[in-house]
């Protein structure tokens, strides 16, 4: 991505101030979503089906990775192509495992139990690479996120010397202990990363992690996030290319039946935003964020015997229940969204025609100028074009690319202005 011109940068700042002045309130108009069914896992010996959170990652081509439950026993990693066809991932010597992340170049990151130890693996250009031990005695090494160019991030628990820290592993196999930059005397755990090298997760500060904080790391520079608004901890779950972060944190609620509940947050342009709750609910979490400025997760209520949650989409300070946006009547309940790509596609596991199925929800674009996919064409879309100015994409409808020609430039501004419909 090339740098903005001074004129584009000034105009982007003006648009940001204008948008901040006009955005208020609760849910308004939002695009509808179609449903793409992912093939159910197949196994010759016995039936297999995805667990409740079977899809763990989706890239910008619509390819997915995750895990499936085989013969009511161990979990195994798998992937789905852009057409929804399912394929197992075979790791030599693996007893169980999970695929966590897939890059736009097809590189897959995950974990596999080999010889009784959980190991970090990378599948790139047809080769499977099992990470070496970064310490003398390893309890586990969890690869959870792909960055770019063979670089990945995850968490390592070593027994000798004893520590739990977030790590980045380079394409050449070098280990970078990012925990030393974040909280050298406390534990750190990685949750996700962006192609621009941002890594996020949680630092378990103080005795038993009572003062836990989300963190964001890039190139040796670490930032500890504040506690969630109105709460006392934070934990980061995802990050986009600019370093905007999603997550959750504990907050006080009188007479809460079992511990304190969590509420979601979005950390955007250095400001911690309270994600709030659906009406009548007391729990929320924002599990993912994309380059469109969308966050997704769930809001609900922890009942003693039957927790009730609804998938939620956040955009421009507004909250939307995802089921209300879905056009397929066969989907009647969506408990949570776990993955979200930069084309606005979301994944979930739902009851579809009385069968548990993994699905991809795809936004229905009404106008080319609606580059942020909120079904209005306004200042938000102009701001996104300028924020992504000079970006080049190898997939359809990248952020800011109104012309869908793979480049964000002046022609995209012309399309946005031509489709103007602020609603």
Image (cartoon, helix red, strand yellow):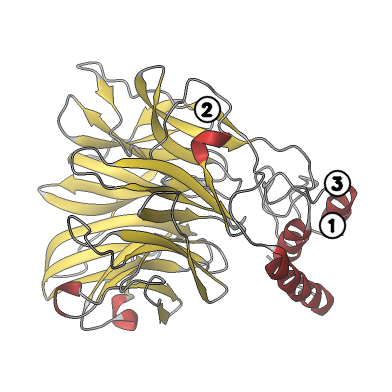
- Tell me which residue sits at (22%, 36%) in the image: 75
Tag 2 secondary structure: strand
In the rendered image, is residue 128 in sight? no
Q: Position of residue 272 (x, y in %)?
A: 48, 72
Q: Residue 246's quadrant in the figure?
A: bottom left
Nearer-N-terminus badge (2/1): 2
Would you call the spot at circle 2 few (<14 residues within 10 Å), some (14-19), or many (20 or more)? some
Q: Position of residue 22 (x, y in %)?
A: 72, 64
The answer to the question of whether label 2 and label 1 lie on touching residues, with beta carbons closer than 8 A, is no
Tag 1 secondary structure: helix
In the rendered image, is residue 138 in sight? yes
The residue tagged 1 is: 413
Q: Residue 172's quadrant in the figure?
A: bottom left
User: Does residue 87 lie above or below 141 as drawn?
Assistant: above
- Tell me which residue sits at (89%, 54%) in the image: 414
The residue tagged 2 is: 36
- The disc placed on residue 419 is 3
Left or right? Give the position of 311 relative to 62: left
């Amino acid at each position: 991505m090339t740098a903005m011109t001074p004129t584009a940068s000034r105009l982007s700042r003006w648009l940001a101030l204008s948008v901040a002045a006009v955005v208020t309130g609760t849910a308004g108009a939002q695009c509808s979503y179609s449903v793409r069914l992912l093939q159910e896992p197949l196994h010759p010996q016995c039936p297999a089906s995805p667990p409740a959170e079977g899809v763990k990652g989706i890239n910008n081509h619509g390819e997915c990775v995750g895990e499936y439950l085989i013969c009511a026993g161990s979990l195994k990693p798998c992937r789905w192509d852009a057409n929804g066809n399912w394929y197992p991932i075979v790791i030599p010597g693996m007893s169980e495992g999970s695929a966590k992340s897939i890059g736009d170049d097809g590189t897959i990151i995950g974990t596999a139990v080999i010889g009784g130890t959980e190991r970090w693996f990378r599948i790139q250009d047809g080769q499977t690479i099992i990470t070496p031990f970064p310490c003398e005695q390893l309890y586990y090494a969890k690869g959870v996120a792909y960055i770019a160019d063979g670089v990945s991030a995850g968490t390592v628990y070593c027994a000798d010397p004893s520590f739990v820290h977030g790590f980045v592993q380079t394409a050449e196999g070098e280990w970078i202990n990012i925990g030393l930059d974040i909280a050298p005397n406390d534990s750190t755990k990685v949750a996700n990363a962006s192609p621009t090298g941002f890594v996020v997760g949680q630092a378990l500060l103080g005795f038993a992690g009572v003062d836990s904080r989300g963190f964001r790391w890039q190139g040796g520079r670490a930032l500890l996030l504040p506690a969630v608004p109105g709460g006392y901890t934070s934990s980061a779950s995802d990050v986009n290319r600019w370093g905007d972060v999603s997550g959750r944190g504990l907050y006080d609620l009188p007479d809460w039946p079992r511990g304190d509940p969590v509420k979601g947050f979005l950390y955007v342009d250095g400001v911690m935003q309270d994600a709030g709750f659906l009406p009548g609910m007391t729990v929320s979490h924002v599990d993912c964020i994309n380059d469109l400025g969308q966050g997704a997760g769930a809001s609900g209520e922890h009942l003693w015997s039957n927790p009730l949650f609804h998938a939620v989409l956040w955009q421009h300070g507004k909250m939307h229940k995802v089921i209300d946006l879905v056009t397929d009547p066969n989907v009647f309940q969506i408990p949570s969204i776990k993955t979200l790509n930069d084309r606005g596609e979301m994944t979930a596991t739902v009851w579809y025609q009385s069968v548990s199925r993994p699905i991809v929800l795809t936004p229905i674009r009404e106008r080319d100028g609606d580059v942020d996919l909120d079904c209005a064409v306004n200042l938000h879309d102009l701001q996104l074009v300028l924020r992504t100015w000079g970006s080049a994409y190898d997939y359809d409808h990248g952020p800011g690319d109104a012309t869908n020609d793979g480049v964000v430039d002046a022609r995209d501004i012309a399309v946005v202005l031509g489709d103007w419909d602020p609603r």
